[in-house]
Amino acid sequence: MHDVAVFDVDNDGDLDLILGDCNGTNLFVNDLYEPGGPIGTNYCGPAVPNSSGFPALMGATGSELAFANDVTLNASMLPTNQFGYFLMSQTQGFIPFFGGSDGNLCLGAPMLRFSKNVLNSGAPGTMTFSPDFDNLPQGTVFAGGSTWNFQLWHRDKGGKSNTTSGISVLFCS
């Protein structure tokens, strides 16, 4: 639950809007609400190493406040110039080598696939995606107080596929 209050915190003569995050920390910078940095908790890792020789890493930045709709998913240590897309689910799971993949699926059903947002890792071996939680498929309820889990499925060199580790984010009201 977030708290909203208006105070003149820094005595500069104007009103500052203060929003609290899930942990009770106040979030504000120079009179403007600015969602924070890294969010979520990694799980199901390390991932199975891909053709880069490393396990792909999953991260998230932005705000845990559901109404902010401000999350960026980051996958790194990917093989270069390969395609992939992000997945999300409210449940965690574990299916090793799913569908012939070298990786482990760390999400349970039902699962949403952002397959219309296929990305390429390019030369840096990274993929970044900001899901629009206000436009999820019909019947999907995204609200504060819910936990969502994310993972990236990606192609790998040699005609195979693999996955990142998972990340779990508790979103506040």
Image: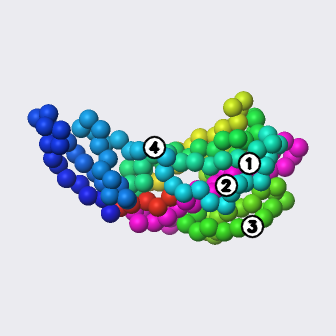
Residue assigned mark 3:
95
Q: Could you tell me which secondary element the residue under label 3 belongs to?
A: strand
Amino acid type, residue under disc 3 in the picture? Ile
Dot placed on the residue nearer the N-terminal end, 3 or 2: 3
Distance from label 4 to label 2 (Cα)? 19 Å
Q: Which of the two labelled residues, at mark 3 and mark 1, occupies the earlier sequence position?
A: 1
- Label annotation for residue 37: 4
| Percent x, y of residue 10 | 18, 38
Residue depicted at 71% across the width and 61% down the height? 105
Res 55 label: 1
- Residue count near mark 1 (Cα–Cα under 10 Å), binned few <14, some 14–19, many ≥20: many
Q: Nearer the viewer, residue 128 or 59?
A: 59
Q: CA distance from mark 4 to mark 1?
A: 23 Å
Identified by mark 1, the residue type is Pro
Does the residue at mark 3 contact the one at mark 2 (Cβ under 8 Å)? no
Residue 160 spot, x, y in % from top left: 84, 49
Q: Which one is in front, 138 or 129?
A: 129
Task: Identify the element where label 2 is drawn.
Answer: loop
